């Protein structure tokens, strides 16, 4: 079973429909036990870093994610759900960055680009041994965001460029994340979801 974590942020129903195409049972939940016990946990996210962290902490989501990682249970973050896996984010921060879940030690910062938000389809420079992008290495994916992580973290990194180069995806053992929205990325996004679900 795949659990999509409901913490008040994210396109939950579109994510639910997209992940259901993988052939797995899918549940949208804020229940800690269900989220922990699922074969895979999806952490979606739409909005600002701090607001998402507030929602996540309200259901002890950070603890759920860390517990899954320490127990070698798969987690997939999407968009802001990727960003909050980092240690800090400086969106709407007054000097002091907001704290994230802290899976990866880096700060999510504003993209240096002439037009923001970055909204639309971008190609991705995929990691050589990527599981997520297996068979879809030359496809484009749908992004909508103004902040991103720019430091190399995790085992495998995939990159894209909008004004500057930043992480499009990270694969790090039992934790993976995409800055883009696979559930909005057509057949390529559904293929990525299937690649991830097949790894569970």
Image: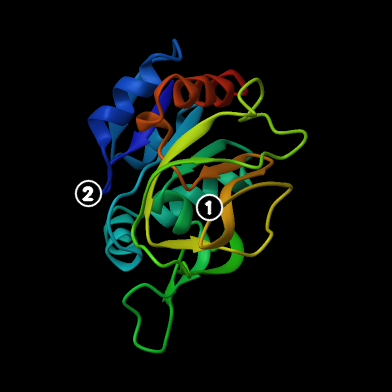
Depth check: 77 or 152 in front?
Answer: 152
**Gap between marks 1 and 2 measured at Cα:** 19 Å
Where the N terminus falls, by quadrant? top left
Please determine whether, in this image, residue 111 is positioned above or below residue 143.
below
Depth check: 112 or 91 in front?
Answer: 112
First along the sequence among labels 1 and 2: 2
Q: Residue at x 69, y 41 (%)?
A: 173
Q: Which residue is drawn at 54% across and 63% down?
A: 102
- State the image coordinates of residue 41 (x, y, percent, origin top left): 45, 35
The extreme top residue here reads: 23
Depth check: 97 or 38 in front?
Answer: 97
Q: Quadrant of residue 186?
A: top left
Q: Label 1 neighbourhood size at 10 Å, few (<14), some (14-19), many (20+)?
A: some
Please determine whether, in this image, residue 191 is positioned above or below residue 12.
above
- State the image coordinates of residue 195 (x, y, percent, origin top left): 58, 22
Residue tagged by mark 1? Answer: 66
The reply to whether residue 36 is in sight is: no
Q: Label 2 neighbourhood size at 10 Å, few (<14), some (14-19), many (20+)?
A: some
Depth check: 24 or 192 in front?
Answer: 192
The reply to whether residue 83 is in sight is: yes
Residue tagged by mark 2? Answer: 8
Give SS at disc 1: helix
């Amino acid at each position: 079973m795949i659990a999509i974590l409901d913490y008040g942020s994210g396109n939950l129903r579109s994510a639910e429909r997209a992940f259901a195409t993988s052939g797995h049972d899918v549940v949208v939940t804020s229940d800690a036990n269900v989220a922990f016990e699922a074969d895979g946990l999806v952490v979606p996210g739409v909005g600002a870093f701090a607001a998402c962290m507030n929602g996540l902490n309200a259901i002890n989501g950070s603890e759920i994610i860390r517990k899954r990682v320490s127990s070698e249970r798969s987690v997939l973050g999407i968009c802001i759900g990727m960003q909050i896996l980092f240690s800090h984010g400086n969106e709407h921060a007054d000097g002091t960055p907001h704290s994230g879940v802290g899976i990866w030690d880096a700060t999510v910062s504003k993209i240096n680009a002439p037009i923001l938000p970055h909204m639309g389809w971008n190609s991705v420079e995929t990691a050589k041994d990527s599981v997520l992008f297996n068979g879809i290495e030359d496809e484009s994916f749908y992004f909508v965001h103004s902040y991103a992580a720019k430091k190399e973290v995790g085992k495998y990194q995939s990159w894209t460029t909008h004004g500057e180069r930043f992480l499009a995806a990270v694969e790090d053992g039992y934790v993976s994340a995409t800055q883009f929205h696979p559930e909005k990325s057509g057949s390529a996004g559904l293929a990525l979801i299937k690649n991830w679900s097949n790894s569970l």
